[in-house]
Image (tube, grey):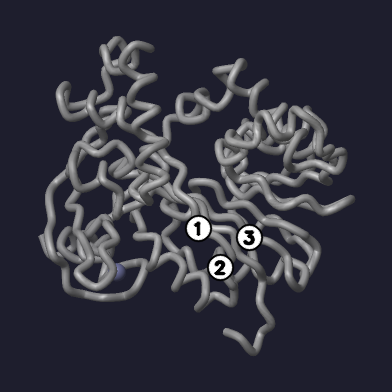
Amino acid sequence: MGAVTSWKKSLLVEGCPVCGEKETSRGFMNFDRLHNLPGSFPVRECSGCSSLYLKEAPPDPAAYYPEGEYYSTYESNTSELRAKRKLIELFYSGNRSLGFAYLLFYPLKGRVQGIPDYVPGGRVLDIGCGFGLLLDLLKEAGWETHGIDVSARAIELVRRKGHNGVSGELRAGRFDAGYFDAVIMSHLIEHLRDPREYLALAREMLKPGGQLIVLAPNARSLGARLFGRAWAPIETPRHLFVPSPKALVKMLRAAGFRAESLKYTGSNWSQSLDYLLNGRYTPGSVFYRPFVSIPLEALAQALNLLRLGDSFQIKARKGPSDAR
Ligand SMILES: [Zn+2]
């Protein structure tokens, strides 16, 4: 019994992963609603910064990432992909023209996420790049593209598409200091046991003034408050924490970055309503049918404008080392 107790203890998370506060304001048990894998996990809300986090990490985190399934969604939905490609061409590449299309599509500019400000001949690294969807778009826009991901299968495909790819943890990348103009962490940080280590490495790899883009689920969203444990972006147990935007800005500042912009991007209401009413992911659920999901998407965009959206994006710059 003693051995079991100490093993259990090593999985306990001491304090909020975002701000370090030990006090919590509420808590509940949650489970894997997406893949229906076994186990139940205690979730806590930090009383210091309102971030949500797993009080007890899964003993074998890799077991909760079914290979293939997890990334497959990134390859679907080609019409949306085509639309995004057009928007990036218009707003985030070198051949930007101030024509009619630019004005016509300007209201949609915010729909494109995770795209760094254009740097002619710039080098970009996507950490946790999956099958390289974002890298494809960036390559077309003229970037030198690099991706790193723990999935060897994903990196194989990334290389075949003509990107530079490394499989493994960020350390395995062995990138030169000051090499990149931009580093992207799109929905990665919430999966990390040591987000500060990743931020420090990202900072080292960036040129002075280089741009870091972080996307994460929003613990302060209306969805998080309304749906509670059924809120889809809690993603138990793959998300070790869900930050509040303010707390993540602080964390970035402590890691030597200057936050430039914060915008709200997410919409997971179809999935959250499915979880709330069906308990777990139910593919045929009415909430995914267009006559429900399209109005929900419109609602999500309104919530994003009210800063209550399900996710957010921070664009930050590497600051001078004395600003840490
Ligand atoms: Zn906190």
Q: CA distance from mark 3 to mark 1?
A: 12 Å
Provide residue 39's location: percent of width, then percent of height: 20, 39
**Kind of element beneath mark 2:** strand
Residue 264 versus residue 284: which sits nearer the camera?
A: 264
Sort mark 3 into few (<14), some (14-19) or many (20+) by Cα contacts within 10 Å. Answer: many
Is label 3 or label 1 in front?
A: 1
What amino acid does circle 1 point to? Leu
The residue singled out by tag 3 in the image is 212
Residues at circles 3 and 1 in contact by the CB criterion of under 8 Å:
no
The residue singled out by tag 2 in the image is 259
Q: Which mark is residue 262?
A: 1
Provide residue 289's location: percent of width, then percent of height: 34, 11
Quadrant of the drawing holding the C terminus = bottom right
Residue 9 versus residue 209: which sits nearer the camera?
A: 209
Earlier sequence position, callout 3 versus callout 1: 3
**Kind of element beneath mark 3:** strand
Q: Residue at x 22, y 34 (%)?
A: 38
User: Going by the image, does 242 lie left or right of 139?
Assistant: left
